Amino acid sequence: MTSTATIADLSTAREVARQLRVDSVRSSTSAGSGHPTSSMSAADLLAVLVTRHLRYDWDNPGNDANDHLIFSKGHASPLLYAVYKAVGVISDEELMTGYRRFGQRLQGHPTPVLPWVDVATGSLGQGLPDGVGVALAGRYLDEVPYRVWVLCGDSEMAEGSMWEALDKAAYYRLSNLVAIVDVNRLGQSGPTELQWDLDAYARRAESFGARVLIVDGHDVDAIDEAYTSATNRTDDRPTVILARTLKGRGFSEVENLEGWHGKPLPAEMAQRAIRELGGESDLVVRGPQPPDEQPATRPAPREMPDLPRWEVGEKVATRRAYGDALTALGGGHPRIVALDGEVGNSTYSEEFAKAFGDRFFEMYIAEQQMIAAAVGLSVRHYVPFASTFAAFLSRAYDFIRMASISRANIRLVGSHAGVEIGADGPSQMALEDLAMLRAVQGSTVLYPSDAVSTAALVRAMVGLDGVSYLRTTRGAYPVLYDQGEDFPIGGSKVLRSSPDDAVTLVGAGVTLHQCLAAADQLAADGIRARVIDLYSVKPIDTATLRDAVAATDGRIVVVEDHHPEGGLGSAVADALLAAGAPTLRFTHLAVRELPGSGSTAEQLGAEGIDADTIAGAARALTS
Amino acid sequence: MTSTATIADLSTAREVARQLRVDSVRSSTSAGSGHPTSSMSAADLLAVLVTRHLRYDWDNPGNDANDHLIFSKGHASPLLYAVYKAVGVISDEELMTGYRRFGQRLQGHPTPVLPWVDVATGSLGQGLPDGVGVALAGRYLDEVPYRVWVLCGDSEMAEGSMWEALDKAAYYRLSNLVAIVDVNRLGQSGPTELQWDLDAYARRAESFGARVLIVDGHDVDAIDEAYTSATNRTDDRPTVILARTLKGRGFSEVENLEGWHGKPLPAEMAQRAIRELGGESDLVVRGPQPPDEQPATRPAPREMPDLPRWEVGEKVATRRAYGDALTALGGGHPRIVALDGEVGNSTYSEEFAKAFGDRFFEMYIAEQQMIAAAVGLSVRHYVPFASTFAAFLSRAYDFIRMASISRANIRLVGSHAGVEIGADGPSQMALEDLAMLRAVQGSTVLYPSDAVSTAALVRAMVGLDGVSYLRTTRGAYPVLYDQGEDFPIGGSKVLRSSPDDAVTLVGAGVTLHQCLAAADQLAADGIRARVIDLYSVKPIDTATLRDAVAATDGRIVVVEDHHPEGGLGSAVADALLAAGAPTLRFTHLAVRELPGSGSTAEQLGAEGIDADTIAGAARALTS
């Protein structure tokens, strides 16, 4: 093993590049899967970066002053892992026996199971948007001069999200962001759209506000100059380095040829490749250390701030309660940040923005970038809340899914849930969001019905790990709970209960208020109903549900302002069946017909999720 | 009423513009909601378009030669409906009593409930991508010179999908597409990102390959010239017209002021606005008729072509069966078209592409545009199949949701479902897709386990309305069914059954094969298991499931390669509970832990969805 204390020279970088190629071939061949050719195209780019420009304390990946390295082209994981060997943080043995193996950390695409990986990548077009979030934190919150280096593929430049990212990088003047685009001309199934038209890429990136440098991606001197230029900035634009490269560079049998995407070389061919590339080596070379500067201290508070207060019976929209609660919390918790998709006056994130403009990031109508920025901010240990109309979170589902794989701690808030919104019509109605968010691994899904519970849940979300989601309602409804009531995640509230209950009614959000009205109607008929506020949809309060159906002879009506699949009804059904509930007489009221415009009352009535329908369903079950 | 037979002059267009503004104010004030100011900014643009350039047979919206008019800024519906009055297809009474009212067709955002509306809009950044699909049909399939005019908002230019659209419009040389961007500078909650920097917009649109014209959006002469230029083309680029406008144009109390987005004018203010705008009118003016040319005839065939054949026991991946089946069907059905997100060699859409290159549209890695193009193609009555990795359909969930509101007939095919894919890791694994697609209103969700059923279901999808989804598997598994077996939508197959069955096992895709292996294990122990192939997840075969649980004393194991929420298990639970099933002993095996890399067998085993775990669960239920 060789090790250098000073910055490596370019000939060393060339040697490292050679080794990165050899190791990309070796690891993928040993695993029998992977993307060696997509790694080989970017080997020179990475060799120069990690030996001479990336300021990273490899012995301490938690060093707040470290630069960040994100592989937006996550399929080039052989290259990334070869880099880890070249800086001495993983062994050759791990590379050769761990890559893509079960239970190992060198997965097919990088995830933060590895301490040097910020975010999971592999769904293309996400690493750069995530990097924008990290760079936002660096420039506006940490105020530390770390740089964010993102290796991008050329194919992924077809994703609109990459342009959302460059747009926001320019808007927020992220000169600490460097996107390196490995233009190897070949996608998975054939040539890319723009192939080697680097001028076309350049025009696009420049028009979006980036400074563009074009290099030969195999010319180590040129790469080095470009990196130097990217880091010695006289303006405040992000940098895009367009590197013309050859896929499979260095091995004549695959170099620049179609048909070699995502294919490991067969063993014999790999031997020829290693020979042509100059043989195996175990060079260890480290690049520059980060500066000593550490981030501005923004500690989490010892005690959470007080929440706003409301009186029982007062009519307050839960979306407004969200804005008020977040603002109250933000006052005492300096790591809370908020983002919105240009509808802050509807989601009420504008309250937070007015109070803490330096911790609010307007993402305009770019929901994918909004979620990615939240992920990037969570990498830097901030506590992001990202809000828009719940319907429009569907725009970013792939980003939410990937956030869960990244184990990012992000908080999503979707307003204007369901047909309750009334006149705006179905395009603005979230009717799939509960299904979408419940299906995310490790997620928390919350759906409060009043202001007091909303505020309590927002406070709880601050401390939650993973992807959490709060569904809020457009209209104002009466406050149901006393100030100070506890709303544990995974809990529920029994709002009506007696020893004579004949039926259980379960609702959340607007339908809880309908359940309460239905219970009043039923009481007038002499039928007692137990009413449950299922504010925590995931995790769910199975014990309370099981007790309720046991007490009401299996009779239960679940009502939701959501499509029938995957929402409240499914959550209750899944919980009761898993708990081995008795024979159920289960009525599920949900939004089954395509809605149009109309008043809230008309919409709830037409879809059969209003008090009258609930009472009717309960009567049918008890008759 | 006035009517003109010849093309209106510009002074008439000015009169129409005035009326469009007045009617936008009147309808939204009458409804008490809506977006008059966003309508007023674009009134001149629309007046010139509909009186002098849009070639549209208003008496016959089904005329195949008609131009297409899409409001990508769907919130400007008052303007669109005012246009409908101005061309005489709706009455002033409908405008004043129908807008945003329950049960009426003039919804808050336009939907194809109206015969002149191609696609539902209102989720921003979708109308232009949809228009690309319509223009693709015009240029490559219909071969009729209709034009596609799309009114875009400036706020929505922040959506990456708009750039995916321009990119594809240029790549496919869609000179029949004209995007009119109403740059009124003000978004919902404040100024837009680029405000009136029309040069910035122009640089971006040009860099993406469009021809750009900049106009004063209130200068009727300039607008007219721009439209003339857009339609007299000497090159084959799409046109982007950037129009500098004033939000609320024409009424001094709101013009160019913040705080008036999405707000109807109060009644008194509306009176002042109408007065300032010159008063009410009922002008009816029609523009030019479409040419007589009709589309190339591509009729649906009388009989569906034969499907490929496989032998029972032969190992075939369902993704490959999809490609083979689609190619076979395409040979006899000229309206079938296919799209892919640059992974056609993985989804096997490349088989279709090789056979019918003129009906295959490579969308590169732009899933949002892929779905939108499918929607646009369905507007023109083609039969689109759009494929990518199932995981990446999550990228386009908002587009799929909107497609259902558009009542578009689109067919989605997602390959590489679940942990079955093995080494690539979680970023490539679809584990939320069943939940996501089931929650779409009116959707059909199919998940076949072998090649024969896959082919049969692909054939059935050709005739399906709405959004349908086929989930395919990476690996090759034995063919289970004889050629010619029937697979009705909403059906299932009972593969193992006896009078002594003690437990029901339900699977689909890879887990069906695991259920069959588990049944063999159980049989060795003397436990008979009924095995159901639930290839139709939505609609679901409730009767067969109910009979099975009745026959097996309520004992059922449902196994899925998907997260526990919203997929197969939920579908079965929902169906059985709705059917009033007996007391269930329900075991649900699903992917509960975040997977990594590994072999298929390791992944299935680790998540507890393999034959051993299924057999163990069945034993536990029967002991």
Image (cartoon, coloured by chain):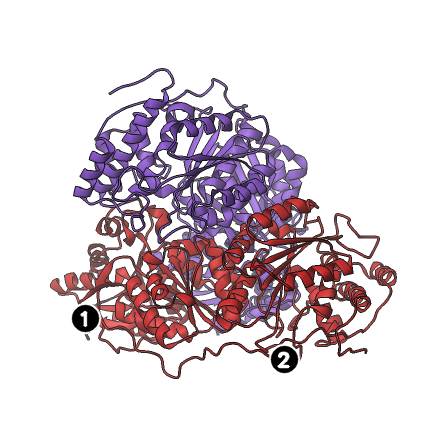
Chain colours: A red, B purple
Residue B297, quarter of the rendered image:
top right
The residue that appears at 19% across and 74% down in the rendered structure is: A498
Q: Is residue B469 above or below residue A297?
A: above
Amino acid at pointer 2: Asn
In the rendered image, residue A530, in percent from the top left (x then y), is placed at 23, 69
The residue that disc 2 covers is A60
Amino acid at pointer 1: Val
The residue that disc 1 covers is A312
Disc 1 crowd, CA 10 A, few/some/many (<14, 14-19, 20+): some
Quadrant including the N terminus of chain A: bottom right
The residue that appears at 78% across and 67% down in the rendered structure is: A13
In the rendered image, residue B601, in percent from the top left (x then y), is placed at 64, 66
Q: Chain of mark 2?
A: A
Farthest top residue?
A: B5
Res B490 visible:
no
Res B467 visible:
yes
In the rendered image, residue A172, in percent from the top left (x then y), is placed at 50, 59
- In this rendering, which labeled residue sits more in front, label 1 or label 2? 2
Q: Is residue B152 above or below residue A5?
A: above
Secondary structure, mark 1, is loop
First in residue order: circle 1 vs circle 2: 2
